[in-house]
DNA sequence: AATATTACCGACCGGACGGTAACAAAATAT
DNA sequence: ATATTTTGTTACCGTCCGGTCGGTAATATT
């Protein structure tokens, strides 16, 4: 499962054949079909596991009493961390190849993640630690920034995960413009 | 060519067959092969055209005398604009399916684009209108934020392009944190 | 000892896709 | 008018891939 997750992230869902996954597990394709009903089911399982991992990671560090600004920071740091560790197939999953049912499930995970960030943003807006116009656009921007890290592969990402999330957070919170 | 570009952006390169492209042009696949040597060549042509369009667009608005901060803003606004108009196949092009030669060409365009933004950032740093740590990370962050818009498709992107780039720019330059 | 259940395999199917060979019709040049 | 180049077409090939079929060891249950 973790292997499939890694392969999906490295080669992309379409270009990872069931034979590839099976080979990675030292079994054969029909054997995969004993455990899973379809390729899509494998993907959905990967997505679910990624989401759970994220939930666990963030639960460890989260504190509801913190100002929104800090809670956004925590979200971003956890998210970057998980991306670096090759999990979160959600990002690689192209809904266009999925069945309606699978699409719905996948969207649901994305929606939950987005809702979490949106909530943190609104908390910050209310407690005065954040200011922005449309939370949805900000949220999309943040996700995009981080999700696109999956496209850095090979070459540029010699950079430490901590440095990345630090500077992303700095840019998001304080901006790069000088007054 | 513009048709291929749009199709690549909408369905993805892999899932756009040569028959699809040919049908979109009301011709047949072998006829495509009269004009292009391979599917990859079509993609590369799309990438090149997208780059040229970007160059034209930004040349219209650019002014070397402006402070770096403004020149970064212009870059982002032009980039968002072009993305909304379905051009820039560069983003959709997954280097993993390309030949070494194609990969090199594709990377070259990306490199040029990245260099342009990096230069603007450095100008801003020197003239004091911008402040940041590692320009590469900032640049990647900005590209990610905007590039990821291609994944918004269907549903969320009811938002006007201008609103998006305005808020992206606001977040990048001023941040969303309150002092 | 007989019977299920679990976990796996080799061989194959049908469809899609990139690409090609051989040939036909316009368009253009002479 | 004829020859030639440009731009198409129909029909096909090889390959890859998701998925299936029938069968087989090994382990657990009765």
Image (tube, coloured by chain):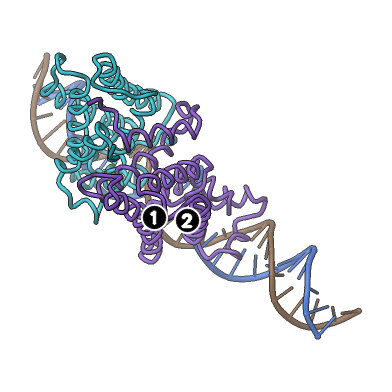
Chain colours: A cyan, B purple, C blue, D brown
Left of B167 or right of it: where is A91? left
Residue picked out by circle 2: B51
Chain letter of disc 2?
B
- Residue A74 vertical position relative to residue A152 in the rendered view, above or below: above
Q: Position of residue B47 (x, y in %)?
A: 47, 56
Residue picked out by circle 1: B113
Q: Quadrant of the N terminus of chain A?
A: top left
Left of B71 or right of it: where is B16? right
What residue is rendered at 19% in x and 28% in y? Answer: A73
Q: Nearer the viewer, residue B124 or A170?
A: B124
The answer to whether marks 1 and 2 mark residues whose Cβ atoms lie closer than 8 Å is: yes
Question: Disc 1 and disc 2: Cα gap in Å?
Answer: 8 Å
- Residue C30 vertical position relative to residue B106 in the rendered view, above or below: below
Chain letter of disc 1?
B
Left of B83 or right of it: where is A179? left
Q: Nearer the viewer, residue A22 or A53?
A: A53
Q: Position of residue B27 (x, y in %)?
A: 66, 54
Q: Quadrant of residue B106?
A: bottom left
- Labels 1 and 2 share a subunit: yes
Q: Position of residue B165 (x, y in %)?
A: 43, 36
Left of A67 or right of it: where is A172? right
- Residue A102 vertical position relative to residue B27 in the rendered view, above or below: above
Q: Earlier in the sequence, mark 1 or mark 2?
A: 2
Q: Quadrant of the C terminus of chain A?
A: top left
Label 2 packing within 10 angstroms: few (<14), some (14-19), many (20+): many
What residue is rendered at 15% in x and 24% in y? Answer: A56
Q: Secondary structure at mark 1?
A: helix
Q: Secondary structure at mark 2?
A: helix
What residue is rendered at 63% in x and 60% in y? Answer: B31
Q: Nearer the viewer, residue C12 or B131?
A: B131
């Amino acid at each position: 499962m973790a292997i499939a997750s890694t392969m999906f992230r490295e080669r992309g869902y379409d270009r990872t054949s069931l034979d590839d996954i099976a080979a990675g597990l030292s079994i054969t394709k029909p054997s995969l079909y004993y455990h899973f009903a379809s390729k899509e089911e494998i993907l959905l399982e990967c997505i679910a596991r990624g989401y759970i991992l994220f939930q666990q990671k963030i639960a460890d560090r989260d504190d509801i009493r913190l100002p929104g600004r800090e809670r956004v920071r925590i979200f971003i740091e956890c998210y970057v961390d998980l991306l670096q560790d090759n999990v979160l197939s959600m990002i690689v999953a192209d809904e266009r190849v999925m069945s309606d049912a699978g699409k719905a499930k996948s969207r649901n995970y994305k929606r939950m993640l987005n809702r979490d960030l949106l909530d943190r943003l609104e908390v910050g807006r209310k407690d005065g630690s954040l200011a922005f116009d449309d939370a949805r656009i900000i949220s999309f921007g943040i996700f995009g920034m981080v999700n696109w890290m999956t496209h850095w592969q090979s070459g540029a990402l010699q950079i430490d995960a901590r440095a990345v999330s630090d500077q992303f957070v700095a840019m998001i919170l304080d901006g790069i413009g000088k007054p």
